[in-house]
Amino acid sequence: MIKTMFDALWTHLGISSVQALSVVISATVLFWFFTLIVSFVGQEARARVTITGFALMALIGAITARAILGDSANLAGGLIALVVLIVWEGVFRLLSRHLPGRWAATNKARVVMRDGVVDQSALRRAHLGMTDLMVRLRCAGITRLTDVAFAIVEADGGITVIRVGAPIDDALLAGINNRTPKPTSS
């Protein structure tokens, strides 16, 4: 009777070695697949959460979890999947220090607007469109483009707007790509 009870418990909590290997392979493939997809989406989509975007992420999460766990949807399978995903995230962060731009786990902040003028190339490198920049400027209370001293796309995709005349310490601008004004031709 105790053996039967233990067998039933193991069925709900345990996992075979073949199932464990399947979880490891599935978690690895799906981690790298989604890392590749998200790297091409850019900061614009990562920073903005809409109702439909949230619903899509919830569905993707559920489908991915089912694909990773397969028939091993139990405690051991879940723990193995979590460990594999956390390990790969750590590996990716270590690798991203040596990878260029969009592959990096964290991008540096970037000035996309200076003294009321939009830097189109910086905007493209930040994977933002002009419309999205204008929306974010309006949300920051900007009513005239000439009121903007700096618009900075942060590493997380958010935008910081510094108004003309607002004092700012140089330390707050440290580590920002392209923060110095471009030379103007006369």
Image (spheres, grey):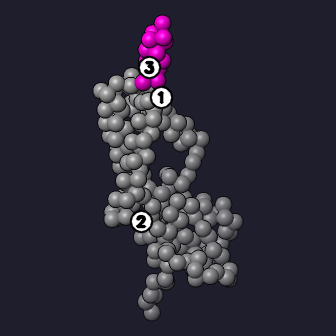
Sequence-first disc among 3 and 2: 3
Q: Is residue 44 above or below residue 181?
A: above
Name the residue that disc number 1 marks.
Answer: 75
Badge 3 local density, few (<14 within 10 Å), some, or many (20+)?
some
Magenta stretch holds residue 10? yes
Q: Nearer the viewer, residue 104 or 143?
A: 104
Residue in view at x 56 percent, y 61 percent: 158
Image location (x, y in percent) of residue 150? 58, 75
Q: Secondary structure at mark 2?
A: helix
Q: Secondary structure at mark 1?
A: helix
Image location (x, y in percent) of residue 44? 50, 56
Residue 102 can be seen in this image: no
**Cβ atoms at labels 2 and 1 below 8 Å apart:** no
Q: Nearer the viewer, residue 160 or 86?
A: 86
Q: Is residue 54 above or below residue 158?
A: above
Image location (x, y in percent) of residue 110? 49, 70
Q: Is residue 101 above or below residue 3?
A: below
Magenta stretch holds residue 5? yes
Residue in view at x 43 percent, y 46 percent: 86
Name the residue that disc number 3 marks.
Answer: 10
**Cβ atoms at labels 3 and 2 below 8 Å apart:** no
Q: Amino acid at mark 3?
A: Trp
Q: Amino acid at mark 1?
A: Leu
Q: In the rendered image, which quarter is residue 168 located in?
A: bottom right
Segment colored magenta: 1-14
**Cβ atoms at labels 1 and 3 below 8 Å apart:** no
- Residue 144, label in figure: none
